[in-house]
Image: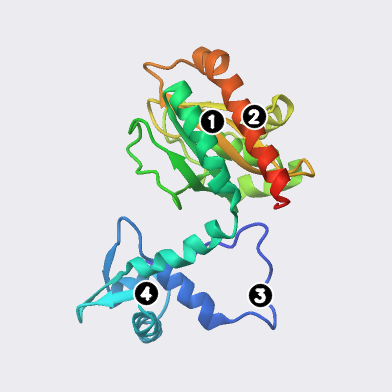
């Protein structure tokens, strides 16, 4: 079955400047994942929604450029593909400055600390400081998770107006990940509004059983939310009360410090 990417709410409508072949190339790259790291031509075509002939031309082009390796039957991405993602990170030196702040926070609270930005209906991790592996999902820079059921995502959604929040919620694949997951559209909007009022978000086992996390916003010089920081832990050893009473003040101080660094760089 084809797995073409759904157009995000804020994506521009293709016009005369739209290069379809380039878009198809990106679909081929995005067809590779942890579940499909090595694929045949037929699998790439199916996952990217292209014909075999179209997928083959793109794969051969990527192979010639060094982004794809093939043994004649199977295809896989090469480490060179990382250049595309790291171009984004290196264009934002703020994360080099933020890393020591997050390392101090992780050491102080004894939990993993992450930074993420909003991309359509997802959050994308741009920096992560590990302490303990607490999730079945392998979280690394570049990992995408749904915004609607994560603490980082709700902080980032809270930086938008209600109309935009509603649009992104409607475009999201909302489902019950656990028995704790809120799935009602009105309830989700209310929770985002509460996050906007209080300036932080706590999500208790809505994404994964046993995972609890709390997040705070990173703002630019104009006061707009451009990223979020969180700390995450295991619910059986870190309660919501401990998160709010002991970790939240330190988290907000770290987020404010990163915001100040961002303002000094003059970067959005």
- Please identify, in this view, whether the residue under mark 1 or under mark 3 is nearer the observer: 3
In the picture, the disc for residue 14 is: 3
Q: Which residue in the protein does label 1 denote?
A: 182
Q: Residue 67 has which mark? A: 4
> Label 2, label 1: how many angstroms apart (C-alpha)?
9 Å
Quadrant hosting residue 137: top left
Q: Earlier in the sequence, mark 1 or mark 4?
A: 4
Residue closest to the eye, 213 or 141: 141
Count of numbered marks: 4
Instruction: Work out whether residue 205 can be spotted.
Output: no
Indicate the quadrant where residue 192 lies: top right
Query: Residue 54, position in %: x, y?
Result: 41, 84
Q: Which comes before the other along the chain, label 2 or label 4?
A: 4
Pick the front one: 237 or 40: 237
Q: Residue at x 65, y 63 (%)?
A: 11
* Callout in the foreground (1, 4): 4
Disc nearer the start of the sequence (4/3): 3
Percent x, y of residue 84 = 48, 67
Crowding near the residue tagged with mark 4, few <14, some 14–19, many ≥20 C-alpha atoms within 10 Å: many
């Amino acid at each position: 079955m084809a797995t073409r990417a759904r157009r995000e709410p804020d994506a521009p409508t293709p016009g005369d400047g739209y290069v379809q072949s380039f878009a198809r190339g990106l679909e081929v790259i995005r067809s590779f994942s942890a579940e499909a790291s090595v694929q045949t031509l037929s699998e790439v075509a199916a996952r990217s929604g292209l014909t075999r002939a179209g997928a083959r031309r793109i794969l051969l082009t990527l192979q010639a450029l060094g982004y794809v390796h093939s043994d004649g039957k199977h295809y896989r991405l090469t480490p060179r593909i990382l250049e595309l993602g790291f171009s984004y990170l290196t264009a934002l030196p703020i994360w080099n400055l933020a890393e020591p702040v997050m390392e101090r926070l992780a050491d102080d609270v004894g939990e993993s600390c992450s930074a993420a930005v909003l991309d359509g209906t997802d959050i994308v991790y741009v920096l992560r400081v590990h302490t303990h592996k607490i999730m079945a999902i392998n979280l690394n820079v570049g990992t995408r998770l749904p915004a609607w059921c994560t603490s980082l995502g709700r902080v980032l959604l809270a930086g938008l107006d209600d109309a935009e929040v509603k649009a992104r919620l409607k475009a999201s694949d909302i489902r019950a990940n656990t028995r704790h997951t809120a799935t009602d559209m009105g309830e989700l909007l209310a929770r985002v509004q509460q996050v906007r009022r209080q300036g932080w978000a706590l999500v208790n086992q809505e994404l994964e059983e046993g995972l609890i996390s709390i997040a705070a916003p990173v703002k630019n010089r104009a006061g707009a939310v451009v990223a979020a920081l969180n700390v995450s832990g295991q619910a059986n050893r870190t309660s919501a009360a401990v998160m709010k009473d002991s970790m939240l003040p330190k988290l907000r101080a770290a987020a404010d410090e990163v915001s100040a660094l961002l303002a000094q760089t003059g970067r959005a």
